[in-house]
Amino acid sequence: MDLVKTAPDGILDLNEVATTLGVRKRRVYDITNVLDGIHLIRKRSKNLIQWVGSDLDHVAGKAPEQQKLRDELSDLSAMEEALDELIKDCAHQLFELTDDKENAKLAYVTYQDIHSVQAFQEQIVIAIKAPEETKLEVPAPKENCIEVRIKSTKGPIDVYLCEVEQENPGVKTFEDMGTLTSETKSAVPLDEEPREKASSAWEAAVTDSQLEQGAVEQTPREAVNSPTLEVFKKSLRTSHSSLEKMPRRARVTPKERVAQFGKDKFHTDGSVLFCTACSKAVDHIRKQTIVEHIESAKHKQNEKRQREDAETAGPSAALKKQGTVTMPFQSSTVAKDCCDTVTLDFFRMCLKADFPLHKMDLPVVRDFLSKHIKGGSAIPKSDQFYSHLPALFEEEKQRLLNDFEGNFIAVIADETADFQNRPVFNILFQVLKVRPPKHADIPAPQLVKTVCLGKVNHATISQALISCMVEFSIPLERILTFVTDSTSYMVKAWNDVLRNLWLNCVHICCYAHIVALAGNTWRDAFKQVDHFVALMKSLLVNAPACRARFLRYLNEQSVDSPTLPPKPVVTRWNTWFNCVKYHAQHYQLYHGFVEYERTEQGDTTVLRELASLLAVEDLHADLKYIAENCGRLVTALNILESQKRQIHKVYNTVLDLISWLEHLASSTDNAKGSMAAQSTADKLRQYNVKSKQPAIDFLRAVRALDPKQIGAVYTDYETVKPELKLSSECNMEWPVYLGLVKDGFIDVEDPIQFWMAVEDHVPKLAKYAVVLLQLTVNSVGVEKSFSKLGILFSAQHQSLTEENVAGMLQLYFNNPD
């Protein structure tokens, strides 16, 4: 723009511009094409342009306004950072408050607490005690009625009408007219647990008209398995103050009456008292009622008949006892529960075996289930199967919650597109235990969330991750690593949001993904080889008959144990190099097979192109060169994508690979090979700096936890401490660790086994070391979850909801065979 302002009539020669600015002319053309597209310049010739936009002096005059906007943006950014700090501080305080077990013991309210509130004096106070997730609804008040509705699916609701004594001792008040549980309670502390819980969905309603009549009512939505309900109605007359105060006394239970009068006379199902001889319910509240029943002539007659029947039947005969109407219903649910168990187990099997659910509707499948599987006929068809999914999803979520509780977490995340090109975001957690198993494999990451994003940017990524942490109750300080690819939105999500919340966390860009991308330069350098690999894949992958003929041909050529070539897949790192090694080994046989196919099966475009490539002299030499020299690259990739404990080897593996590639580039006679090796080394060096690999200092420092490397790496604790985020408690134990290594305390290949062996000597340091050495450094797990996602998100599953697909993928991925 400075050049345009100084040019006569705004006319510029692009050759002079490129020379003055020191850039290639193509870059200048990129700029002028954009300016021409928005009608700010006009091309007078190929290399001459003229400014036709607004007066440049007028544009320059807007600089103060732009500076003002920049200052405003800076202030807003500072305010946002301050708010982020406050949110983070609040989150920490909330977690500390809710996670403290001592606080949990004090999470209750007593009658005395309510009585002490001044605002409740001379008021009617209704205290409600309900399970978690209870919903309370207050409709709009009517002229003569105020209504409150409470709904719960996790147990009964207790409603207490509490007395709040007034200052005037002469005034009497009303208290404790009833509760909504299956058992009547008087004014007891609200933290007391009810004696019985209900498994049904409960709904309670309290209105002021009922309050005037002293009535509260509770209705279970389901009759089966619900306890016997009691509805208490007491008249309040015209004024609460005119009533006598009821004495506080706990109601006696049926079980206590059985113990009082004897098990030979009475029994109970928990909520109702039954006379064993009369087979009838007896009111257990009033003792006099029970005494009158025992002394009645009818009872004595039934008791005599009971003794005579017992003498006739003998001592081994079982006595039939009366139960409530719910008991037969409970027995009748046994078959249903068995059927549900078979259905859910069968569904789990289908997911693990990747058995298409729609095939369950085939007559041959239905006949087999009915004939050979007990209860198999009750297994529903595919259209009814999905109603059973929520139970499986909830079961899996509970398993994950139990697994995560009290442990450190590594987060692995990535994004892909489904078959409808919608962005899908998968979040995996790796559990890091202080006492891991002794085998060499690190804990496998677990898929916890699949989110369909509307759009992909750092904001939607951050929101999905934070919501996931809240849903699974993960303390922020227990998140240690965030493993992703190196895309800009992942980096921005970390830098702008997550790093301010996850203070103990390190962001690791997946080195396996980086090396795989760098390795693609070999495909670019050896284009003929890459084309040959693609043609062989096209010939064999989608043609079962051709594959059979290929194996038969290899067998005829005396190839021992003939196999098909590996299938090269872009998302499966190393497969291209393995495929090239296979083709180099079998190259001499390909010409004969291609000619056989063209003669016997007919000529095709693929076969003609293969025949042309096989005639190129350099093809075989290039295949052999890659096969002989790609071993180090393949080995490095295997280490970086391994599920074994390798975090202490990552930094050295990448450095060794770069050194080998640079040596190969300078020593080889193959021009294409030299170019591929040098290009790969250059790309890896770009990703071995802080700006491209934010965890480079962490990966360098974690080597100090390997006793075999400590002598050649670090001995200064102050150098290691900030990178590994070690606590100050480890200061005194670091010299002890160095002494143990120097004295040759133990010699093991796995450093985790070393730390578990010296735990008694350095307990704090050992705890940190064991957890850090389990960390995964690659996103292989999330790539595998995408492979399974492709199966579920196929066209035949379009009828599934996003929630069902996400839940099925979670079960499918987390529970492999």
Image: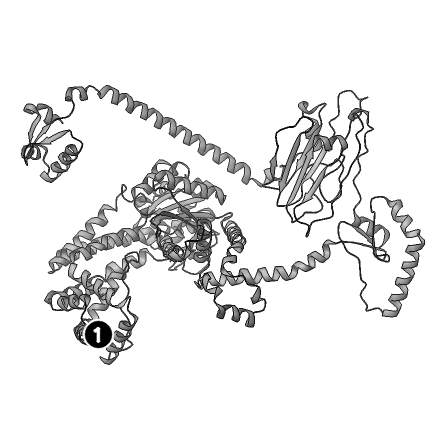
Q: Position of residue 792 (x, y in %)?
A: 41, 56
**Residue 108 placement, left or right of 244:** left
Q: Quadrant of residue 161?
A: top right
Residue appearing at x 75%, y 20% in the figure: 167
Residue appearing at x 53%, y 69% in the figure: 369
**Residue 258 placement, left or right of 810:** right
Q: Quadrant of residue 629?
A: bottom left
Q: Quadrant of residue 280?
A: bottom right
Q: On the image, numbered disc 1 is attached to which residue?
A: 601
Q: Is residue 24 visible?
A: no
The residue carrying pointer 1 sits among few (fewer than 14), some (14 to 19) or many (20 or more) residues within 10 Å by Cα, namely: few
**Nearer to us in this view, 638 or 226:** 226
Q: What is the count of numbered marks? A: 1
Extreme residue in the right direction:
297
Q: Position of residue 668 (x, y in %)?
A: 13, 60
Question: Quick one: quadrant of the C terminus?
Answer: bottom left
* Above or below: residue 680 compared with residue 2: below
Q: Is residue 16 visible?
A: yes
**Nearer to us in this view, 460 or 547:** 547
